[in-house]
Amino acid sequence: MITGHLVRQARRRSGLTQADLAARVATTQSAIARWETGGATPSLETLRRIIEACGFELRYGITEPDSTEWSLAQRNLALTHEQRLDQLVRTVAFTRAGRDAMTAHAATSTVAAMPIRSGANGADA
């Protein structure tokens, strides 16, 4: 489904209809629709042509995996169900407190009115 999302996003960002894109890549509107909905999957080369027909470039490469994500997952897996639930409850409480503090700050802060100046020398109009 990732390829379908890429096709739809590129087409929409370029302002093309499915029929417009189909004409550019010498296929049918129904093929574009199937690719966008995940009913079919274009080859990598076809996906590259589709993206280029929309005026974009498809970049891909191989990178090393991010080990920090895996180590975090391993630490969480080592927790008991109760510990994970407690961690979640604390995270939600922290998030709510932050949101409440921001809301309270926004309600009490005022924005000073600045005079509007015009003219080349910045004098009041």
Image (cartoon, rainbow, N blue to C red):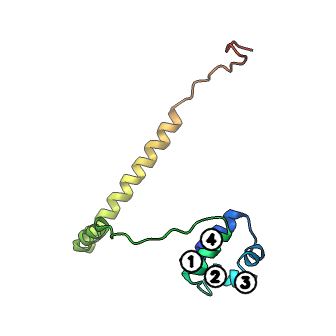
Q: CA distance from mark 2 to mark 3?
A: 11 Å
The percent coordinates of residue 73 (x first, y second) are 29, 71
Crowd tier of the residue under label 2, counting other residues whose Cα lies within 10 Å: few below 14, some 14–19, many 20 or above: many
Residue flagged by tag 4: what amino acid is it? Answer: Ile
Q: Nearer the viewer, residue 124 or 99?
A: 124
Point out which mark residue 3 bears.
1
Identified at 51% across, 31% down, the residue is 109
Mark 2 sits on what residue?
A: 35
Q: CA distance from mark 2 to mark 1?
A: 7 Å
Q: Nearer the viewer, residue 27 or 110?
A: 27
Residue flagged by tag 2: what amino acid is it? Answer: Trp
Q: Earlier in the sequence, mark 2 or mark 3?
A: 3
Residue flagged by tag 3: what amino acid is it? Answer: Thr
The percent coordinates of residue 31 (x first, y second) are 70, 85
Determine whether, in the image, residue 10 is placed left or right of residue 28: left
Q: Earlier in the sequence, mark 2 or mark 4?
A: 2
Residue flagged by tag 1: what amino acid is it? Answer: Thr
Point out which mark residue 27 bears.
3
Of circles 2 and 3, which is in front?
A: 3
Mark 3 secondary-structure assignment: loop
Q: CA distance from mark 1 to mark 4?
A: 10 Å
Q: CA distance from mark 2 to mark 4?
A: 12 Å
Q: Quadrant of the N terminus?
A: bottom right
Q: Earlier in the sequence, mark 3 or mark 4?
A: 3
Identified at 75% across, 15% down, the residue is 125
Image position of 21 with respect to 92: above or below: below
Q: CA distance from mark 3 to mark 4?
A: 14 Å
Mark 4 sits on what residue?
A: 51
Q: Earlier in the sequence, mark 2 or mark 1?
A: 1
State yes or no: discs 2 and 1 in contact (Cβ < 8 Å). Answer: yes
State yes or no: discs 2 and 4 in contact (Cβ < 8 Å). Answer: no
